Image: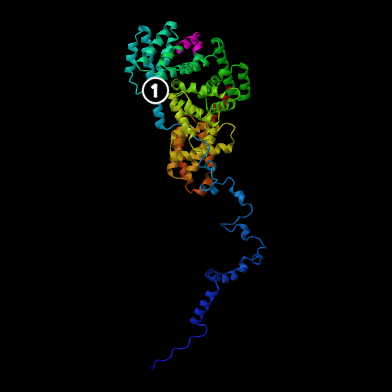
Amino acid sequence: ANIPPSPPLPAGGSRNKRKKKKDARLFFPSFFLRDMSTIKSTKRDKMKHSATARLKTGGLARKGGGGGKGTWGRAGDEYKYDNDKAYLNSQDPNYDSVDDDEAGFYFSAAPEKSVEIAFAASIYMQKKFKEKIRTAAREFFSSNVKEEFETSIKEAKMRDSLLYHEIVKEVVRMALDKGEKGMHAATELLRHLTKKKIVDPRHIYKGFYHLFNQASEIMIDVPKAKDSLIYALDCTLIMGVSQDQINYLTDSLTMCTEPNTLKKAKSTIAEMAKEYLDSEDVKELSRCFLELKMPYLGHELIKKSISIAMDRGPRERELVSKLVSETAGSCVTREESCKGFEILLQRVEDLHMDVPDVLEILAAFVARAVADEAIPPSFLLQAHIQEGDGGYAVIQHAQRLLSKPHAMSRLQRVWGPNSGDSILSLKKTIKDLVLEYFSSADLKEAAALCKGIPPHFHHEIVKRSFVLALDKNQREVDLTIKLLLDLYAKRLTWKSQLAAGLRRIEVSLDDMVLDNTKAKDIYAEFREKVVKDAGIETLATVNEEQNKTAESKNNA
């Protein structure tokens, strides 16, 4: 009962606040009340966003527009993005790796080691099989016993029948030298093999197709080969070859001329190709070829030019690739261009004897021709090449080259930088190949890439490889020494170029010390190994070598 009364609430207390809030809910919606909380800050920041706040900067953007993320940047900043690697962003939708220095624009056509081994094995297997066929064919034409030939083929123990078209080709080719009697015996033998199901119509047609591709050369050695081939082809109708296939092959012989005229035309085409490699004038070559008035020999121009370039250097191969590209569709039909490549692919086994790198070189020619649209991409699928042939491995390697990133643009430099390239372009090429070598440590591929660099510019390889290795670890320095000594051992570079490269490093050594304090010590060790193993004892010997080289050139 003696409880004291509670003290009175102050004016504007919580009770009055709750009452005011309750009254406000009766007249204003909830979203309006939420936005009321921002009114105070908006009024406070009004001057911050108004024009009066920028009076101190003269009405312009602060920091000249270069205030950081979300700003336009200062005037002239756009020039910093031109050819500047620091601003390349791989996440940018417009990013193209071909613009990146690390990506490069030139790559080697050298096959992988496993591909090279498989190719060599297939060449060896095909050569052995052909030798057995030739031996069995000689015995057959001397004894005329079909069963012995059949037994010899079975004893060959081929893994599959992919190369059985070689039986047809070798037997018919040998029969052409035996006259009508020999051709009659050959057709009877093929008929016997068809009945025994050793060969089928597919092998018969493929063998004759290869023979008819070589008809122009066969007729030079055997003048009456045209009539004999047509007779043997007509006999294949009872062996399962269709009439359409027979007509197709027969039509391909209609363009064959007299053996003497053909031999003279081939000799003229060979001289034209050699002269083109000296003059580099494609228009003159096209004009001379059109004057022959033999458009059906366009494949001979393609085939002969590529065959000559295989024995030459990167410059000649680049010229022939341009020849194939610029003559396709003009003086040489695309069908004739495809035929020229097809004949080369069918002769890979023979080419391998003279050109051990035929897999790499011919695949590069094919891939470059596809990139230049001289031959269609469907040629790689429609060429008459069996899976067991050496040409099939060339086609597969060409497909691998075309499937690489930016292949269509990078194949333009498949033969390396040419003599028309600028110094900056050559330097960029050397930087690309050195960086790729550091990442892969593939000495063989690096040496192949260095072949494309003009020999008088190899001093840049010495300097650039050392400069790039200096920014990395001891591993890269050792790789550089290994590369330079390998180039010198293979006679791909001169002693004078190694010495010139070392002199260029010594001139810039003081600047290198600013970035790497151990640059002089690293270079001293580097120079000692290169000089010792390459035999660069004094600069006098180098000058003597240069003088001898200059004298030999003048005498030549």
Seen as rendered, the residue at the extreme front is 26
Is residue 68 at least partly visible in the picture? yes
Q: Which residue is mark 1?
A: 162
Q: Main secondary structure of the magenta part?
A: helix
**Residue 412 position (above or below residue 92):** above
- Which span is picked out in magenta? 218-233
Total of numbered circles in the picture?
1
User: Given the image, on which type of amino acid does mark 1 rest?
Assistant: Leu
Q: Image height check: is 396 above or below 244?
A: below
Graded by Cα atoms within 10 Å as few (under 14), some (14 to 19) or many (20 or more), the crowding at tag 1 reads few
Q: Nearer the viewer, residue 387 or 110?
A: 387
The quarter in which the N terminus is drawn is bottom left
Q: Residue furthest right?
A: 58
Q: Is 231 contained in the magenta span? A: yes
On the image, the x and y values in percent for residue 247 come to 50, 16
Report helix, strand or loop for mark 1.
Answer: loop
Is residue 447 among the parts visible in the rendering?
Answer: no
